[in-house]
Image (cartoon, rainbow, N blue to C red):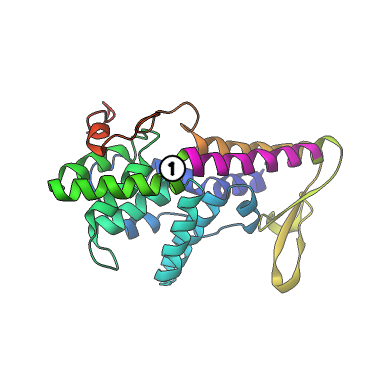
Amino acid sequence: MKIFRTLSFVLMATASVGASAMANTAQPADPRALLRKVNAYCPGGIERILPGEYYFCAAARDFGKNHDARARERLRDAAYWASKPAQYVLGLMYFNGDDGPINRPLGVAWLALASERHDPRFEPAFAKAYLQLSPAEKAQADAYWVDMREKYGDRTAGTRAHRIYLAEMRNLQAALMFGGSVFIDGIAPPNGDSVGSFNGPGGARASSVGSGSTGFTIQRLIGKSGDDFFRGLNGTVTVGDAEMVPLGNVVTKASPKAD
């Protein structure tokens, strides 16, 4: 059972940071403090299944090694694959001027994207940040958001990420049903037991997810991580369906649970 507890921790790293580091965040905070709470072990095999979760984890790892420029690129990659924590951290970075000039309108646009599923971890910070903007800054934030939504909003990025996730999960399920094996790089049990781990080139580790209870347990763990990642994606009203509206209209609809 130790292997399954280990896998659960690895696969749900970003979910746990949402429940702890980002919980009850009611105003723009320190993005580095949030990233330091993310588990820095990022199994490479998750990239093809949940790329948004993988790149967010990789960004935290790179920040921890002071590779700031690469970490910011990883955050943008994660945002492209609908990672709301990544979009939230980018919003904090621009709003606060972390490692660069302050750009409050751009920060608010990122925070708006992070909040489009009305997640109480992110929405209060977006609302408070927006209300701090001047009228000119609000107009600029609207312009940024209209442009960025086409690439990073859930209609595009969320659909893109969910389509890949479903395809990979179907492949995994088919392999399990027909007795095949699926190799997930970077996820290996302690001492190489139970799941058929092996050493690859350059010390790389991987796991063979075969049929039987072990394979189905790992499938359930990955499925739970996917459920957490995509929670709120389907059927949400982000800012407007047929027509774009100013961000101020969204602020007035902030979650009643926001403090």
User: In the image, residue 19 lies at what x, y percent?
Assistant: 40, 40
Give the answer, above or below, for where 252 lies relative to 159.
above
Front in this rendered view, residue 120 or 163 = 163
Which residue ends up furthest to the front in the rendered image?
243
Q: Which residue is mark 1?
A: 153
Looking at the image, residue 222 sits to the left or right of residue 98; the answer is right
User: In the image, residue 20 lies at what x, y percent?
Assistant: 38, 44
Whether 222 is among the magenta residues is: no
Q: Quadrant of the C terminus?
A: top left
- Give the residue at x 48% y 61%: 74
Looking at the image, residue 76 sits to the left or right of residue 204; the answer is left
- What's the residue type where badge 1 is placed? Gly
Element at badge 1? loop
Front in this rendered view, residue 98 or 212 = 98
User: In the image, residue 258 lies at what x, y percent?
Assistant: 25, 32
Front in this rendered view, residue 2 or 61 = 61
- What range of the chain is rendered magenta? 155-174
Evaluate whether residue 22 shows in this view. no
User: In the image, residue 49 lies at what x, y percent?
Assistant: 63, 47
Decide: few, some or many residues near mark 1? Use Cα within 10 Å; few <14, some 14-19, many ≥20.
many
- Give the residue at x 37% y 43%: 113
- Give the residue at x 58% y 39%: 162
Give the answer, above or below, for where 191 lies relative to 28.
below
Evaluate whether residue 186 shows in this view. yes
Q: Quadrant of the N terminus?
A: top right
Front in this rendered view, residue 153 or 111 = 153
Quadrant position of residue 197 = bottom right
Taken as a whole, is the magenta stretch helix, strand or loop? helix
